[in-house]
Amino acid sequence: MAWQRVIMKTPILTQEIIKIFQKFGLSKDHAQISANALINAELVGAYGHGLSRLKMYCDRISKKVINPKPKIKIKRISQSISHLDANNSIGFVAADIGIKTAIKNAKKTGIGMVAVKNSGHYGLSGYYAEQAVKKNLITMIYTNAPPAVAPHGALKSLFGTNPICFGTPTGSKIPFILDTSISVINRGKIRVAARNNQKIPEGVALDKFGKPTTDAKKALSGVQLPIAGFRGSGLAWMVDILSGVLTGGNHAGRVKDPFDDFTGPQNIGHLFITFKANLFQKNYNQRIKDNIKMIKKLPKIKGIKEIMYPGQNKFNRYKNNLNKKISISDLIKKDLENLKSF
Amino acid sequence: MAWQRVIMKTPILTQEIIKIFQKFGLSKDHAQISANALINAELVGAYGHGLSRLKMYCDRISKKVINPKPKIKIKRISQSISHLDANNSIGFVAADIGIKTAIKNAKKTGIGMVAVKNSGHYGLSGYYAEQAVKKNLITMIYTNAPPAVAPHGALKSLFGTNPICFGTPTGSKIPFILDTSISVINRGKIRVAARNNQKIPEGVALDKFGKPTTDAKKALSGVQLPIAGFRGSGLAWMVDILSGVLTGGNHAGRVKDPFDDFTGPQNIGHLFITFKANLFQKNYNQRIKDNIKMIKKLPKIKGIKEIMYPGQNKFNRYKNNLNKKISISDLIKKDLENLKSF
């Protein structure tokens, strides 16, 4: 790593972030929800969704494109289905209410579906999936994002990195959480690399002229490539439809870049689907334990010690980091100081 | 194409297949459902799911691993959720009842979910998705399949090509149907290539020793590669969980190859999720029309005339072929003759 790092204790850092968000007008409750999500991203090693975004959120509140005191409306469509108008809240809060409502609906009827509109970037889908999985639910979560990936055949970005997220209980402490963007790498990672003048791998992005690049800054102003060509492009399109067209959120490339575009709120949409894991088979937990065991027992490629299921590495990083101090770059430390003295 | 072709009129061919299935013990109704699915695959150009499989289905009925007279049980779990035990029916029939039940549930409550167990290969997921989309529903369909793709890090196939299918109305005649297997290419295509001694592209498969191959026969006894490494492997795992672990179907590599393994039924599982497209936005059809229009308007890569959405090409092929005669290989013609005189 090219940058200086500062070490801070997690609870102290969390308190600092809560205070900063409160200073910018969030209620204590909303500040806490948002701080927890940011700290979680740091602990699982998803730095592109962590503290590197704190200043952006505060800037958006200052410029009145995030509403610090939202009046969030929940419309009940049926016992299973709800529609949330987040009133341009910070995304964390909208998503927190969204997943909790979906969990409540599924607990009542077996299946829950919650669409959210007028929200913003909410960090990691997997963070919300975990909440549902802890309640013995399977969950599927979709959100769109600002243009970053070109549709197959197009010369211009339009789809976001539009993650597909799926979570299930595993009968063990470590949940199965697939949380995969459909770009070859995560936009947050390119952003962190750009901030720190690091290179990105080949085959990940094109510059704005359509040429392959390993320069993170050029990649940000260019086009990210979807996984698997037409297939990945189709999956990104699906996510744009499920989270934008369906919910009443922005779509078709209209979600604003949170870092660069302060001309209005993002109006991102999210979709949360949840259902009881044991709907059809009482012994679901035993069945999935067996599934994972069978796969882990397969002969391995040379150099691979264990076949990991999605979410396992993240969980291990979280566990390792939880009682350690968080190491932050001096750039972020400077953000924190500036925001505290705002 | 290296093989001889015979031309037949679609209705005549359909009647021949119905007669063959009836001869093998299917009811007229089930024979019709199965024939329609096979012919549809031919018309959309998905030959790997079409008549090349007819003999296999008949063989499985003869060897008593497909039940021609199934007693299919539908268990109602709630107004939205149903569980189907297909009693080892031919997959087409189980899937037909599955999607129709999911449509009925969604029409009643807004959302429908139907899990199917003890089923078999049902052809193209997109064929069932179309039924839901015609009723103004959005649909997500999952099914597993015999081992073909190695989990990331493993040296042995375990996941099927496990398609992810998503369908939505578009406000136009041509539905948006994403139906993408998570292997680099469709196993059916490799099978057709093997039957006709054709090569497959590079980067698609490894032989049984773990070496890259373009020999279709070697690929069939080897390992197919998932799209996008760990991501594609995770998506395949998700589909195995949703269609196998959840439903009561086989999973973790236990689905038998329908062509090679007659030691028992496949017990494939399917999951059908359906919901009203206008649940949250009354003008959904206008919104998706706008979405597609925006994307089609993007600047295009040189040589690309139109940015196509998933399902568009297939629909065009179907429309083109519908009133033409179907061209079948003499190998399949021979199958037909043999099966008719069975």
Image (tube, coloured by chain):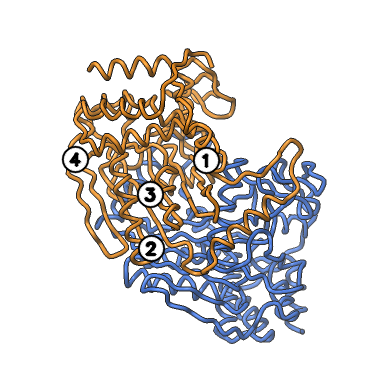
Chain colours: A orange, B blue
Q: Identify which amino acid the numbered label 2 is placed on.
A: Ile
Q: Nearer the viewer, mark 3 or mark 2?
A: 2
Instruction: Answer whether labels 3 and 2 touch (C-beta < 8 Å).
Output: no
Q: Which residue is mark 2?
A: A111
Quarter of the image that includes the N terminus of chain A: top right
Instruction: Answer whether labels 4 and 1 touch (C-beta < 8 Å).
Output: no
Instruction: Answer whether labels 4 and 3 touch (C-beta < 8 Å).
Output: no
Question: Both on one chain, marks 2 and 1?
Answer: yes
Residue situated in front as seen by the camera: B62 or B287: B62
Q: Residues within 10 Å of mark 3 (few under 14, many from 20)?
A: many
Say which residue appears at 42% left-offset and 74% top-offset: B77
The circle drawn on residue B200 is none
Q: Which residue is mark 1?
A: A315
Q: Position of residue A20 (x, y in %)?
A: 26, 25
Q: Identify which amino acid the numbered label 4 is placed on.
A: Pro
Q: Quadrant of residue A304?
A: top right
The numbered mark 1 sits on a residue in which chain?
A
The numbered mark 2 sits on a residue in which chain?
A
Q: Nearer the viewer, mark 4 or mark 3?
A: 4
As measured in the structure, the alpha-carbon distance from the residue carrying label 4 to the one carrying label 3 is 25 Å
- Of mark 4 and mark 1, the one earlier in the sequence is 4
Q: Position of residue A57 (x, y in %)?
A: 29, 28
Callout 3: SS: helix
Q: Quadrant of residue B169?
A: bottom left
Callout 2: SS: strand
Q: Taking A219 as reference, is A128 left or right?
A: left
Q: Identify which amino acid the numbered label 1 is placed on.
A: Phe
Q: Taking A312 as reference, is A236 left or right?
A: left
The numbered mark 4 sits on a residue in which chain?
A
- Of mark 3 and mark 2, the one earlier in the sequence is 2
Q: Which residue is mark 3?
A: A241
Q: Which residue is mark 4?
A: A70
